[in-house]
Image (cartoon, helix red, strand yellow):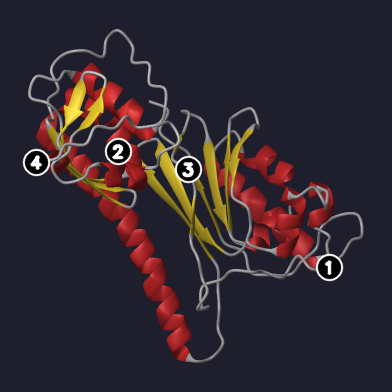
Amino acid sequence: MRKWRAILEKDKTLKEWARVLKPGGRLFMGDIVIDPNQARVEGNIIKFIAFQKDSDVRDGLRLLAKLCKVNIVPSASVTGPLSCPELRDVTFFLFLTAPVAAHKIGRAGYRDLALSAWRATQAILDGIEQGNSRIIGLGLGAATTIAVVEIDARAVRTYHAGDSMILVTGQRGKIKYQTISHSPVAYAVEAGLVHTDDAIYHEDRHLISNMIGSGDMRVEIGPRLTLAPRDTVVVASDGLFDNLQVQEIVAIVRSGPLVAAGTELVARCRARMLEFSEQRPHKPDDLSFILYRPDPT
């Protein structure tokens, strides 16, 4: 049987790597060898991968580093036998962290962790798709926007469609993450065509290019973030961000009790909505938001 030998190049994607694993061949990566029947990738999901019998956790990390094209430098405490010799149906991120997680919590625990994370993502996307289909099915031309934050301990991931926004800020007011609204004005701000402070006054700020209730609806999935003990997450409709500047919101929510911060946001937005002023934002609208902060302990 003809054999194939290949070295995974830095610019290869997971899909290209899957093509390298041809029938009867082997993929050689330094001192780690994987037979084609020991690994299968579908898109960004690793359906199955088995490590060599005597691999330790550092061997697993070396393999993942080459497959995922990243530089992994484990600390000295990460050592010992690989408790999880195989993985099934894991996402790209979980595939990257699998050896360390499996080493710490064992094979059964990691399998449950991987499946629960994948199912959470699928449940969120399926729910949004179902909602979109139902709104379209009404035949009324109705539409809405959505913003979702998946939280697992201090790990978070965002999902949104439209101009409902998600913001993560540190205790000192540093903006660690902010979603980009699906709107012409937001894209203009990102392109440097409109200044951030001017966007809230723009005459077209009410226009959006993506929404629930459209056949072309798309869901933007953000990166996986790790929250610091005193970070604050804000999930809100445009009624908040169209009446308060981002720095105003950050100044209110970055520290102190969340109930007090929420009360202050409502009071300021209500005042802005009820009283027109050329010196400050004013847009009568509905208002909904969620504030979240991880337990510092």
Label 1 or label 4, whichever comes before in sequence order:
4
**Residue at numbered disc 2:** 94
Front residue (pair 233, 116): 116
Give the Cα separation between the discs numbered 2 and 1. 44 Å
Residue at 74 percent across and 69 percent down: it is 284
Give the Cα separation between the discs numbered 4 and 2. 34 Å
Q: Residues within 10 Å of mark 3 (few under 14, many from 20)?
A: few
Give the Cα separation between the discs numbered 1 and 3. 31 Å
Residue 1, disc: 4
Label 4 or label 3, whichever comes before in sequence order:
4
Q: Residues within 10 Å of mark 4 (few under 14, many from 20)?
A: few
Amino acid identity at mark 1: Glu
**Along the horizontal axis of the image, is 128 left or right of 281?**
left
**Residue at numbered disc 1:** 203
Amino acid identity at mark 2: Leu
Tags 4 and 3 touching, CB below 8 Å: no
